[in-house]
């Protein structure tokens, strides 16, 4: 399906993060030459990156304009997947400056660097479903809905969208060698997420230690999807863009077909892990949207993309991963590879 990435030079920013590490494994399996750019490697992923044969790992701050520019100038990537971000709503309340610097200025640095490229390069910018002005829309946000953001993380992602649009219209439209796409995905779950204040890692940390997990906002609805779903969308968008300018500067939503609450997800995961316990705390730690839903008709009709796994499978392979890793002490590189093989065989689009 993604044979076009074989021997291609691919830069992944945020490669040490949850989505970035899965994307690196997938790209390596596809035969790409991958270079990573991140500012940090958490201890849980040290082994993974020892096993992964990346061409280079750059440990730099995305806000360093000169260093970002030099890496892109020297590597001349065929593809860039820009995932690096301060990705947590909770942290954005504690550190708005870091959140805006990383998400907005970091993206500006990527844009400035690719503007100077004279080689062919397709860049996919990863923003979020949270870039939309939240009006609790039941039919799901469409790509041309208004941007907004009542919390700092969401505002940083909405601002990033406006920046990408203005930069493309101001500077990149004359550059035939550059292709730009934007991916807006819903809440992603899967093995190897170790972030704080995210429901899956919170459950895993408690359940592995035989404790009950306390969940907040049980009735909040989120577009939960397995990490490989949006990654399949980003890869597909990059592949199509590299072949045709038809979708240049277009944004696409990538989300699930089903709607589920936090409680639905925790119940389903608990069933997959010997009915592990959970408690509900209705006191809100910080303000978050109640209903988030994406309309993914554009990705289906124009890219022929659609989600592959149903909600049960998503919860099951997520919990299977953590059980294999933590209880059976399997290696995260092998686990990711085997789940990618499983997912690729079942891809709903060809
Ligand atoms: N995980 C989700 O549910 C979800 C949902 C929608 C959108 N997203 C977006 O997808 C992208 C990836 O998310 P994730 O869950 O993998 O995030 P993550 O927090 O697991 O990883 C973030 C990555 O960015 C890097 N990074 C952070 N600040 C940096 C800086 N200043 N300089 C260089 N590197 C820096 C980190 O080292 C890490 O590699 C982000 O843009 C995020 O906003 C995530």
Image (tube, rainbow, N blue to C red):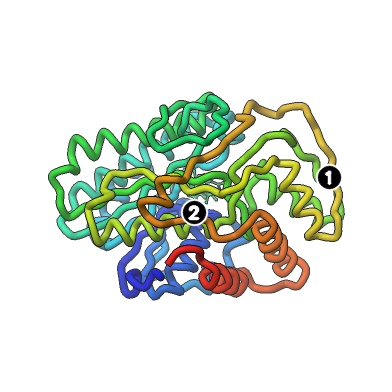
Q: Residue furthest front?
A: 301
The number of numbered discs placed on residues in the rendered structure image is 2
Label 2 vs 1, first from the N-terminus:
2
Closer to the camera in the image, 245 or 211: 245
Residue 195 screen position, x and y as percent: 63, 48
Residue 163 screen position, x and y as percent: 32, 34
Instruction: Please state if 101 lies on the left or on the right of 69 as rendered.
Output: right
Image quadrant occupied by the C terminus: bottom left
The answer to whether the residue bearing label 1 lies less than 8 angstroms from the nearest atom of ligand 1 is: no
Q: Residue at x 47, y 45 (%)?
A: 296
Q: Residue at x 56, y 72 (%)?
A: 337
The answer to whether the residue bearing label 2 lies less than 8 angstroms from the nearest atom of ligand 1 is: yes
Give the vertical position of 262 relative to 268 (above or below). Answer: above
Residue 283 screen position, x and y as percent: 77, 27
Instruction: Tell me which corner region of the image, top left, top right, bottom left or bottom right, holds residue 142.
Output: top left
Examine the rendering and report whether any part of residue 71 can be seen: no
- The residue that mark 1 highlights is 278
Q: CA distance from mark 2 to mark 1?
A: 28 Å
Give the vertical position of 135 relative to 312 (above or below). Answer: above
- The residue that mark 2 highlights is 230
Q: Residue at x 15, y 52 (%)?
A: 176
Q: Mark number for residue 261?
A: none
Closer to the camera in the image, 129 or 35: 129
Residue 104 screen position, x and y as percent: 38, 36
Instruction: Please state if 65 lies on the left or on the right of 15 as rendered.
Output: left
Instruction: Please state if 129 lies on the left or on the right of 105 as rendered.
Output: right
Give the vertical position of 228 relative to 211 (above or below). Answer: below
Q: Residue at x 45, y 32 (%)?
A: 156
Query: Label 2's element?
Result: helix
Do the residues bearing badges 2 and 1 touch, measured as CB atoms within 8 Å?
A: no
Query: Label 1's element?
Result: strand
Image quadrant occupied by the N terminus: bottom left
């Amino acid at each position: 399906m993604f044979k076009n990435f074989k021997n291609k030079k691919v830069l992944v920013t945020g490669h040490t993060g949850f989505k970035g590490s899965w994307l690196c494994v997938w790209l390596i399996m596809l035969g790409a030459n991958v270079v990573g750019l991140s500012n940090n490697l958490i201890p849980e992923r040290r082994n993974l990156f020892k096993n992964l044969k990346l061409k280079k790992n750059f440990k730099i701050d995305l806000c360093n304009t000169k260093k970002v520019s030099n890496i892109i100038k020297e590597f001349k990537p065929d593809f860039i997947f820009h995932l690096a971000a301060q990705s947590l709503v909770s942290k954005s309340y504690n550190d708005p400056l870091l959140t805006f610097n990383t998400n907005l200025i970091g993206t500006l640095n990527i844009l400035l660097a690719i503007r100077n490229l004279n080689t062919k390069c397709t860049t996919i910018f990863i923003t979020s479903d949270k870039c939309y002005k939240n009006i609790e829309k039941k039919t799901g946000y469409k790509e041309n809905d208004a941007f907004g953001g009542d919390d700092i993380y969401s505002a940083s992602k909405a601002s990033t969208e406006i920046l990408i649009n203005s930069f493309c219209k101001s500077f990149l439209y004359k550059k035939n060698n550059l292709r730009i796409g934007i991916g807006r995905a819903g809440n992603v779950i899967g093995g190897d997420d170790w972030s704080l204040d995210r429901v899956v890692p919170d459950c895993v940390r408690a359940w592995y230690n035989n404790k009950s997990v306390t969940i907040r906002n049980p009735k909040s609805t989120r577009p939960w999807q397995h990490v490989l779903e949006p990654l399949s969308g980003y890869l597909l968008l990059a592949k199509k863009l590299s072949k045709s300018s038809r979708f240049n500067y277009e944004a696409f939503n990538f989300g699930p077909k089903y709607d589920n609450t936090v409680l639905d997800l925790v119940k389903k995961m608990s069933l997959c892990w010997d009915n592990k316990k959970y408690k509900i705390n209705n006191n809100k730690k910080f303000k978050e949207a109640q209903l988030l839903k994406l309309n993914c008709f554009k990705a289906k009709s124009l890219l022929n993309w659609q989600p592959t796994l149903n909600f049960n499978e998503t919860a099951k392979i997520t919990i299977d991963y953590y059980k294999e890793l933590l209880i059976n002490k399997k290696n995260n590189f092998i686990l990711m590879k085997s789940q990618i093989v499983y997912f690729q065989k079942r891809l709903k689009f060809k």
